[in-house]
Image (cartoon, grey):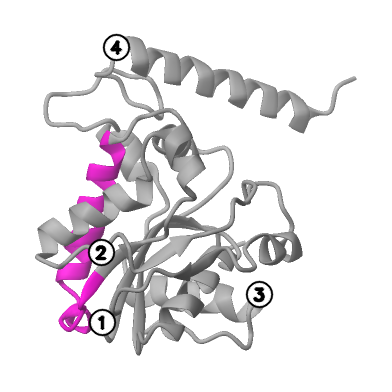
């Protein structure tokens, strides 16, 4: 008999494919559950959006990010602040939405998540001296393949809504890396060694670094390290989802 968890994975994968096909054929459906969207809804229905495991307290999301970084990178500097929308759980509606945003061309979700992050950041006094918003960059070959960097689109929304400068060339992605999905914490650290480099532009004292999903923090830690080398004295984070376990 096939293990129950294997059957569940097959079922979830099939459901995700059906939902993604529905969205391509009829884009006014929820990318998470496939139901028809109401006029005021954007890519995700209100029911699914409310079902996501949200951080309601900015302090709690910041503490959660620091705890993950301390666990995997005890000697690395910690961010000045960290704004996170949701806790990430495997095989739930949020994972389906993030997968659609990242790999299936549903870039409209970047507008939604960017606006939600911007609202939280605008209400945080620690964000008042941010000099630039920068997204974790993609390698140029990956950007060609996907046609866009979802973190960059999210960063643009944050910049526009919070009236902050968005800099796309403060650091560059100089190493083509395999997907972090499925890698162990040690493999993730190795995968991003020398992945980023300075781009040669002056870096403000306080930078807001944007990424879509943080798991062990390997990518964020590597990007933060290069930004610090380039002169950033404070680095804050804006992240859509954080894997806390």
Frontmost of labels 4 and 1 is 1
Taking the image as drawn, is residue 2 in sight? yes
Above/below status of 233 relative to 54 = below
Q: Residue under label 1, please give it.
A: 204
Between the C-alphas of marks 1 and 3, the distance is 27 Å
Do residues under tags 2 and 3 come within 8 Å of each other at their CB atoms?
Answer: no
Q: Residue under label 2, please give it.
A: 167
Between the C-alphas of marks 2 and 4, the distance is 35 Å
Q: Main secondary structure of the magenta part?
A: helix
Residue 116 in the image, given as x and y percentages of width and height: 23, 54
Q: Which mark is residue 72?
A: 3
Q: Earlier in the sequence, mark 3 or mark 4?
A: 4
Frontmost of labels 2 and 4 is 2
* Quarter the N terminus occupies: top right
Q: Earlier in the sequence, mark 4 or mark 1?
A: 4
Q: Earlier in the sequence, mark 2 or mark 1?
A: 2
Secondary structure, mark 2, is loop
Do residues under tags 3 and 4 come within 8 Å of each other at their CB atoms?
Answer: no
* Quarter the C terminus occupies: bottom right
Do residues under tags 2 and 1 come within 8 Å of each other at their CB atoms?
Answer: no
Query: For this view, does 89 lie left or right of residue 163?
Result: right
Magenta residue span: 108-132
Residue 44 in the image, given as x and y percentages of width and height: 30, 33
Frontmost of labels 1 and 3 is 1
Secondary structure, mark 3, is helix
Q: Residue under label 4, please give it.
A: 26
Crowding at dot 3, Cα within 10 Å, few <14 / some 14-19 / many 20+, comes out as some
């Amino acid at each position: 008999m096939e293990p129950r968890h294997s059957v569940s994975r097959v079922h979830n994968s099939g459901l995700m494919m059906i939902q993604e096909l529905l969205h391509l054929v009829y884009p006014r459906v929820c990318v998470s559950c496939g139901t028809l969207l109401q006029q005021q809804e954007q890519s995700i229905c209100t029911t699914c959006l409310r079902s996501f495991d949200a951080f309601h307290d900015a302090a709690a999301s910041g503490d959660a990010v620091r705890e993950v970084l301390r666990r995997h990178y005890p000697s690395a500097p910690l961010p000045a602040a960290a704004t996170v929308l949701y806790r990430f759980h495997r095989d739930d509606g949020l994972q389906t939405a993030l997968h659609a945003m990242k790999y299936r061309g549903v870039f409209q979700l970047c507008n939604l998540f960017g606006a939600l992050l911007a609202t939280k950041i605008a209400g945080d006094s620690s964000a008042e001296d941010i000099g630039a918003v920068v997204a974790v960059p993609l390698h140029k070959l990956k950007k060609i393949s996907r046609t866009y960097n979802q973190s960059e689109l999210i960063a643009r929304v944050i910049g526009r809504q919070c009236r902050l400068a968005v800099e796309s060339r403060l650091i560059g992605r100089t190493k083509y890396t395999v997907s972090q999905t499925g890698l162990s914490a040690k493999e993730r650290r190795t995968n991003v060694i020398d992945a980023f480099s300075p781009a040669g532009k002056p870096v403000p004292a306080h930078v807001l670094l944007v990424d879509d999903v943080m798991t062990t923090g390997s990518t964020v830690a590597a990007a933060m390290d290069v930004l610090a080398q380039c002169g950033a004295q404070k680095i804050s984070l804006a992240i859509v989802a954080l894997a806390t376990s």
